[in-house]
Amino acid sequence: MNPRVGWALAVAAVALGGWQWGWRGLVLGATVVVFWLLLQFSRSLRVLRQAGSAPKGTVANAVMLHSRLQTGMTLMQILPITGSLGEPLAPPPEERFAWTDGGGDRVEVLLRDGRLAEWQLLRADA
């Protein structure tokens, strides 16, 4: 979901609550927004905890990972598929990561503006 749409809905919930029920509606709207933010934070922590427990840059099957990737995915959508944090390939301004499986096949991804822009599968020599 686009963050602008999410924040617009949050503002609309608070404004509608305030218009309908006064200060009690404002409190209800703010409570709903805070609850939504806590859910997002909890989801992020769960994904990072799972990915951080596996060896860095490893994946069960690089070919399957390659087939499941789609343009526009965020890192929080990629990490549950890989099951581990990616091995960084470039310094921090550029977001390039790689995952390698047991057979030596490797998937390299490039994120632009936090979204998956390019990826390639590099097969191990036979």
Image (cartoon, rainbow, N blue to C red):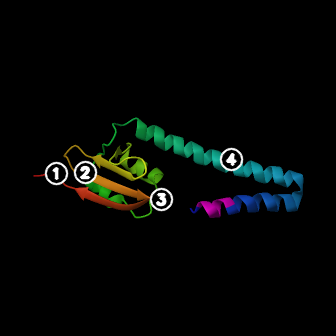
What's the amino acid at mark 3? Asp
Q: Amino acid at mark 4?
A: Phe
Residue 106: give its label.
2
Instruction: Indicate whether 10 appears above or below 59.
Output: below
From the viewer's perspective, tell me whether residue 79 is left or right of residue 3: left
Q: Which residues are magenta?
A: 3-7
Question: Which amino acid type is shown beneath numbered disc 2?
Answer: Arg
Measured as percent of width and height from the top left, residue 104 is found at: 20, 46
Q: Residues within 10 Å of mark 2 (few under 14, many from 20)?
A: many
Along the horizontal axis of the image, is 89 left or right of 79?
Answer: left
| Real-space Cα separation, disc 2 to disc 4, in angstroms | 39 Å
User: Viewer-nearest of labels 1 and 4?
Assistant: 1
In three-dimensional space, the C-alpha distance between marks 3 and 2, rounded to whole angstroms, equals 23 Å
Q: Secondary structure at mark 4?
A: helix
Q: Which residue is mark 4?
A: 35
The residue at the point 47 percent across, 50 percent down is 76
Check whether the beta carbons of the residues at disc 3 and disc 4 lie within 8 A of each other: no
Distance from Cα at disc 1 to Cα at disc 2: 8 Å
Q: Which residue is mark 3?
A: 113
Q: How many marks?
A: 4
Foreground: 83 or 122? 122
In space, the residues marked 1 and 4 are separated at their CA atoms by 46 Å
The image quarter containing residue 120 is bottom left
